[in-house]
Image (tube, coloured by chain):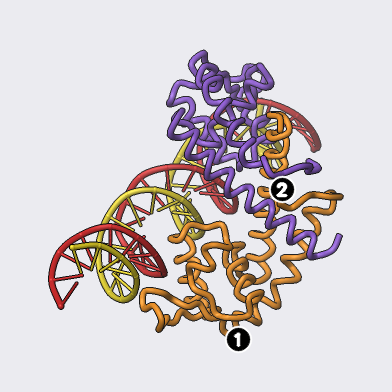
Chain colours: A purple, B orange, C red, D yellow
DNA sequence: GAACAATACATGCACCTGCATCTAATGCAA
DNA sequence: TTGCATTAGATGCAGGTGCATGTATTGTTC
């Protein structure tokens, strides 16, 4: 692993990240009134197909616990998820996706995929992790 | 280019970006009192080895023009670069690295490279663009 | 040359993020 | 049980970012 390769790879990551976040922010925002973080949280819940603890989400999305707490708060305000107390551990909070949240996700997912396909159209083969 | 590949690649980019930015922020900040954006701007100037227009920098670092303007302002406040008017086009601004800026960059570059090597240690082969 | 569009950069503003901290609940030890 | 460390999540705060806009300068068209 030499410096040049690491730096080049980093610049690649920076470029794709910037382009991707910018495009997602625009497309998801304009068309579905969702931010990238909001969509990502909805997407994780849908994938798991069950209610999740805040902490579980925290492991999956790359956000601090405080940022995630606020994303969930915004989603709840928009009635896309609901928070409900966890009986096992009353410190915990379950995040449960609403029907409206599921619908909005279903609506936004094709946009999300399309943006990413566009971003990585020039990427023949990359080794994810 | 199928959806799954695009999404996986995106998650890879998100993960590396989050990990890298976090580590750079910590290491460059604690050890050299520089943010990632500040270092990146210094790095670009050093690579080009000449004063650059704000606009030229804008093409290289993934920041909005306004954000870049502020990064340069912070760097100037820290005496690491100086802004000087461009005589050809008096709207323009040249950013010139100072001796102190060059020294700080030289000091921070090994930290930067080390962090990136660490981040991409598990990345056998990636095709940058 | 005058009027107007376009460009370069700076700045007000709103928003999002992370850090530090707070509160409440849990676990553990004496 | 009591006391204390730990954990889950919420929140105050400071800082960085992008968007929209402002100011100054340049280019263009008549």
Q: Residue at x 52, y 58 (%)?
A: B63
B25 or D19: which is nearer to us? D19
Q: Residues within 10 Å of mark 1 (few under 14, many from 20)?
A: few
Q: Is residue B50 left or right of residue B114?
A: left
Which image quadrant is residue C5 in?
Answer: bottom left
B54 or B38: which is nearer to us? B54
Q: Is residue A58 left or right of residue B65?
A: right
Locate residue A114, reporting x and y percent: 59, 32
A42 lies above or below B101: above
A52 lies above or below D28: above
Give the Cα separation between the discs numbered 1 and 2: 33 Å
Q: Residue at x 46, y 79 (%)?
A: B83
What chain letter is assigned to the residue under label 2?
B
What chain letter is assigned to the residue under label 1?
B
Locate residue B123, reporting x and y percent: 83, 49
Q: Secondary structure at mark 1?
A: helix
- How many labels were placed on the picture? 2
Q: Which residue occupies the extreme bottom position in the image?
A: B99
Q: Which mark is residue B125?
A: none
Q: Residues within 10 Å of mark 2 (few under 14, many from 20)?
A: many
Lower sequence index among marks 1 and 2: 2
State the residue position of label 2.
Answer: B16
Does the image show residue A84? no
Q: Secondary structure at mark 2?
A: helix
Does the image show residue A38? yes
A1 lies above or below B106: above
Q: Quadrant of the N terminus of chain A?
A: bottom right
Locate residue C27, reporting x and y percent: 75, 29
Locate residue B22, reporting x and y percent: 66, 53
Q: Which residue occupies the extreme top position in the image?
A: A99
Q: Residue at x 51, y 19 (%)?
A: A101
Q: Which mark is residue B99?
A: 1
């Amino acid at each position: 692993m030499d410096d040049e390769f690491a730096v080049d790879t980093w610049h690649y990551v920076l470029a794709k990240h910037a382009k991707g976040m910018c495009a997602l922010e625009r497309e998801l925002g304009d068309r579905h009134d969702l931010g990238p973080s909001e969509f990502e949280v909805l997407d994780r819940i849908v994938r798991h197909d069950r209610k999740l603890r805040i902490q579980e989400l925290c492991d999956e999305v790359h956000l601090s616990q405080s940022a995630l707490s606020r994303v969930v708060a915004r989603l709840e305000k928009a009635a896309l998820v609901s928070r409900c107390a966890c009986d096992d551990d009353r410190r915990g909070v379950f995040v449960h996706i609403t029907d409206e949240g599921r619908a909005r996700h279903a609506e936004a997912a094709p946009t999300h995929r399309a943006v990413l396909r566009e971003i990585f159209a020039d990427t023949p083969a990359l080794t994810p992790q």
